[in-house]
Each structure stands twice: as C-alpha cells, then as structure tokens.
Amino acid sequence: SYELNQPPSVSVSPGQTVSITCSGGKLGDKYTCWYQQRPGQSPAVVIYEDNKRPSGIPERFSGSNSGDTATLTISGTQAMDEGDYYCQAWDSSTVVFGGGTKLTVL
Amino acid sequence: QVQLVESGGGVVQPGKSLRLSCAASEFTFSLYSVHWVRQAPGKGLEWVAAISYDESKKYYADSVKGRFTISRDNSKNTLYLQMNGLRADDTAFYYCAREVVTAIPYFDYWGQGTLVTVSS
C-alpha cells in the first residue's frame, strides 16, 4: 500500500520560515493537499492541488510537489500556526494521510 | 455555514457493534461524496471509508474492510458508519468529512468528531 512519510516534529521561531516535507514514491505525479489541526480541533485544509490556498488561508502558506517530495512552507510563521500538519494524497480510490508533523513555534 | 455533526460514539466491548451518524446541514448533501476519517487519541489521521453522492460507490481501508459498512440516507441528509466486530485498535475519534472535487478531491469541511472507545 502507498505510504506518505513526514518528520514527526519541526520547530521555528516566530517570523521565520519553516518547511514541512512529505515523501512518497513518485508523489510528484499525484496531487497533494495539506491539513492543519490545532490542539482540540478538527483538521482544516490549508493547501490543495499541491499549491492552491482555499479562501481564508493566509498567503504565508504555500506548497510545492516534485519528484518524491511535497513541501508545505510557512513564511513569517505566527504563534497561531502551531499544531499538527498532515499531507494527503490519493492512491487509486483510497485516501492516504502522512503520519503528521507537529509544528512548534518557539 | 456548512455543518457536519457526528453522533453515536461511546464505550463498547470488543466484538460488539456500534453505528455512527453524521448529520449534514446548510448544503445539498445529495451532491457530495463523504468520508469517515478516524484518529486514535494522540495519533495521526487514518482514512476509514468513502461513499459517493448516490451511494453507487463505496471504498474502505483494509483495516476495516469486512467489518465496517458506510451508507447514507440522502432524504435525511445523514451519513452512517456501521461498525461490527470492534477491536481495541478501533478506539478513536471518528470524523465525517465532505469531499469537494477540483482537479483532485480534498476535504473542505469536517465534523467535530465522535469518540469510540472499545474496551472490556
């Protein structure tokens, strides 16, 4: 079965840029989306179709996808960006999530 | 505002059954495919099952295939998950999520989740 791998945790200082990676075989041939889950809340999409932001998502969130790796980048990170981030792709007709990355804003 | 409200969670013994519901409102439920996604306490997201808008297509994760059944009643704007043969590793928050189709589908709305605890 298809797998997506993410680092368990990353940390960043406020105002700095952080990238969260998601790796999977030929992931660049698929579309990837990213979900943010703040503590105690349900997930919410922040990036879809590799690099598109839904309405209401700040411009500091961006995405890319090439080769075997998709990347979520947050520029000018704010304290409110702290939480868990999950990448997601499709494998045939089933949904695959990455294991999640805990973002800490120090 | 689109709403998805799960219910039916609780404590159940191993081997028993439980049915979850997800009530949808403020959108035309019958036009959307919907999914169940679960999250064990302190763990990551795991996709569980999906059903097409007209119930013609159903898909399941290998971990629940043969034990869980997804269904919907478009007249009641409600999604269901019948869970049989529950095991301890089915303990999780269960979320319903609406699928929106662009170039590739993604989940644009999620419910708040309902907790299922499988324990003797």
Image (cartoon, coloured by chain):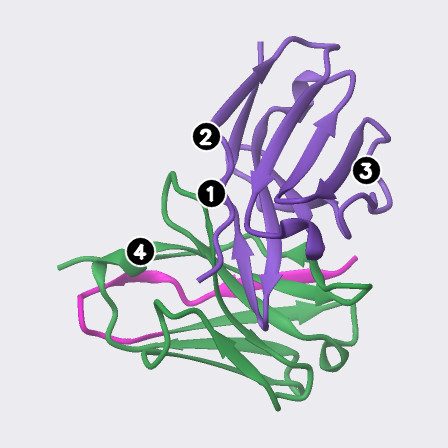
Chain colours: A purple, B green
Q: Residue at x 64, y 8 (%)?
A: A13
* Residue type indicated by callout 3: Ile
Q: Is residue B50 magenta?
A: no
Q: Chain of mark 4?
A: B
Check if mark 4's residue and mark 2's residue have beta carbons within 8 Å. no
Foreground: disc 3 or disc 1: 1
Per the image, the residue denoted by label 4 is B91
Check if mark 2's residue and mark 1's residue have beta carbons within 8 Å. yes
* Residue type indicated by callout 4: Thr
Per the image, the residue denoted by label 1 is A99
Between disc 3 and disc 1, whose residue precedes? 3
Per the image, the residue denoted by label 3 is A57
Q: CA distance from mark 4 to mark 2?
A: 22 Å
Per the image, the residue denoted by label 2 is A8
Q: Residue at x 55, y 51 (%)?
A: A25
Tell me if mark 4 has few (under 14), some (14-19) or many (20+) residues whose alpha carbon lies within 10 angstroms of its own: many
* Residue type indicated by callout 1: Gly
In this view, the residue in front, B17 or B68, is: B68
Q: Chain of mark 1?
A: A
Q: Marks 3 and 4: same chain?
A: no
Foreground: disc 4 or disc 2: 2
Up the image or down, B100 lies above or below A63; here it is below
Between disc 2 and disc 3, whose residue precedes? 2
Foreground: disc 2 or disc 3: 2
In which quadrant will I find the N terminus of chain A? bottom left
